[in-house]
Amino acid sequence: GCQSCHGDSQAHMAKPAEGQARPSPEIVFSGPHTSPTEQRTKVCLDCHEGSARTHWQGSQHAAADVTCANCHSSHAVQDPVLSAVSQAQVCFTCHAEQRAAVLKPSHHPVVEGQMSCSDCHNPHGSTGPHLLVGTTVNETCYGCHDEKRGPMLWEHPPVQEDCSICHTPHGSVQASLLKQRA
């Protein structure tokens, strides 16, 4: 029920005196009486900590005072951030540079809904750079592009080091997400 997220909120649930406004619940997730970031995040993590959210504390999103309610809609029939088709639009509200990149001619099929931001990134925290699901750029890329892993007859040293030496992950005007013309 409401109290599991919004707290006991007895004053809010009681009928206000005539002419008095109903007080806010103890924990408010948005609007003019929004509760502190730590309090809102704690409510969510009380039930949802662990698994993909193991590294929330200390993540870039936590450090930027982003809370679960900034991305998730708990009162919606279908939370947009949980669908590959609509997730990117939620992410793009803050990540405008990536939004612009995925609109370039060469891009991963994010805007087409064939993959989502969370296929490569864990917004709840990660041990890798840029909230990547893998511990390295290459490990993340090999999740879909295993054929590039090797061993190859003729190894290409930049591939062994970091795919992003030559490729940009979000979008490019060059074919195959290359940073510059081949």
Image (cartoon, rainbow, N blue to C red):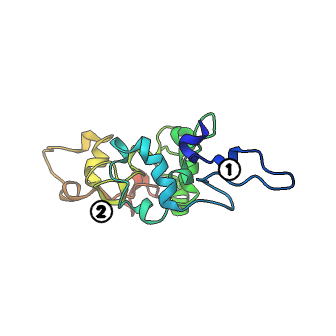
Q: Is residue 167 left or right of residue 154?
A: right
**Tag 2, which secondary structure?**
helix
**Residue 92 drawn at (x, y percent):** 56, 55
In three-dimensional space, the C-alpha distance between marks 2 and 1, rounded to whole angstroms, equals: 58 Å
- Residue displayed at 43% across by 60% down: 62
Give the vertical position of 58 relative to 82 (above or below): below
Q: Is residue 84 visible?
A: yes
Q: Which mark is residue 29?
A: none
- Residue displayed at 50% across by 57% down: 39
**Residue 116 drawn at (x, y percent):** 47, 43
Q: Is residue 12 left or right of residue 79?
A: right
**Tag 1, which secondary structure?**
helix
**Residue 98 drawn at (x, y percent):** 50, 59
- Residue displayed at 82% across by 56% down: 20
- For this rendering, which residue is in front, 20 or 138? 20
Picture quarter containing residue 181? bottom left
Give the vertical position of 163 relative to 114 (above or below): below
Instruction: Please name the residue that numbered disc 2 is placed on.
Output: 165
Which amino acid lies under the numbered mark 2 shown in the image of this protein? Ile
Within 10 Å of the Cα at label 1, are there few (<14), some (14-19), or many (20+) other Cα atoms? few
Q: Locate the C terminus by quadrant.
A: bottom left
- For this rendering, which residue is in front, 138 or 119? 119
Instruction: Please name the residue that numbered disc 1 is placed on.
Output: 11
Comparing labels 2 and 1, the label whose residue is closer to the camera? 1
- Residue displayed at 69% across by 44% down: 13
Q: Earlier in the sequence, mark 2 or mark 1?
A: 1
